[in-house]
Amino acid sequence: MVVFEKISVIYNFARPVLDIAFLTFIIYKGYGLIVKTQGAEILKAVIMTAIAYGLALFLNLQTVLWIFNMLAPGFLIAFAIVFQPELRKIFLHLGQTAWLKPGDRYKKGYVEGIIIAAEVLSEQKRGMLCVLERSISLREIIDGGTKLNADISSGLIVSIFGSDTPLHDGAIVLQSGKIVAAGCFLPLSERQDIKKSFGTRHRAALGLAEKTDAVTLIVSEETGALSLAYDSKLFYDLDTKTISKMLEQLLRIKAEATSQGGTLNENASAD
């Protein structure tokens, strides 16, 4: 009994700290989820509705309050219909994201090997789609391709995309230090504000970035431009130095990691 009483005292003392820590964690992850899934529109709609209801309540506008109360079930249904794509993304992230999965699964040498391959393919005007998995599983994408489970190397990547093999039209998917699959097909973006000059590769990379937290490196077959797609955004025509820094940050690669591979071409123009 004495032991349980001591545990109870310790818990009662630590409970406010745990309460605040847990709430902070939920708010932090929730904010990140809203940013990554473009759920800001949902948040704006909720805030505007809450402000309108609060004003009606404060000003005692009985007719407006009666309308709000009568239409509340309809508002919920309309809200779900209008924001169905955003809600789907949020629940998809909640269901697939391993929030506590450790980072640092990629090394700097892997990034350098990928960029070297991208440089070679860019000079040859050969298209490339290289997907780097982060927290959200890409199992469905991988299962639709050809399993490789090979070590990451610039030579292998160039051989996949540098010739007209059955695998060169799809994407390769990377997990940690492995090329797990090639010839994978990605979901196309349904956005209407994409430049008409963008081809299928850019639309596919953006489509995956809208549905997962993966990072995709694209080489344009028409122009040889290098681009990155992640978090529902597409960054077009980047130089290799910028891409290297962005990938190191996105993949949580430690600065002290040992560098491998050749030198990077830093003379490409940035958009």
Image (spheres, rainbow, N blue to C red):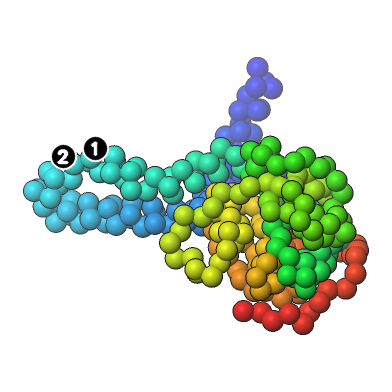
The residue positioned 65% from the left and 70% from the top of the image is 222
The residue positioned 90% from the left and 69% from the top of the image is 262
| Label 2 CA crowd tier, 10 Å (few <14, some 14–19, many 20+) | few
| Depth check, front residue: 101 or 131 | 131
Element class at badge 2: helix
Q: Residue furthest front?
A: 164
* Amino acid type, callout 2: Met
| Label 1 CA crowd tier, 10 Å (few <14, some 14–19, many 20+) | few
| Depth check, front residue: 96 or 194 | 194
Q: Is residue 205 above or below residue 144?
A: below
Q: Is residue 92 left or right of residue 137?
A: left
**Relative image position of residue 33 (x, y in whole percent):** 53, 51
Q: Where, quadrant-wise, is the C terminus in this rendering?
A: bottom right
Q: Is residue 31 above or below residue 138?
A: below
User: How far apart, in angstroms, are the residues tagged by discs 2 and 1?
Assistant: 8 Å
The residue positioned 58% from the left and 52% from the top of the image is 208
* Amino acid type, callout 1: Pro
Q: Which mark is residue 133?
A: none
| Depth check, front residue: 124 or 90 | 124
Q: Which mark is residue 73?
A: 1
Q: Residue furthest top?
A: 1
Q: Is residue 213 above or below residue 195?
A: above
Q: Is residue 96 left or right of residue 101?
A: left
**Relative image position of residue 132 (x, y in whole percent):** 71, 53
**Relative image position of residue 37 (x, y in whole percent):** 50, 53
**Relative image position of residue 13 (x, y in whole percent):** 59, 38
Q: What residue does disc 2 label?
A: 70
Residue 18 visible: no
Element class at badge 1: helix
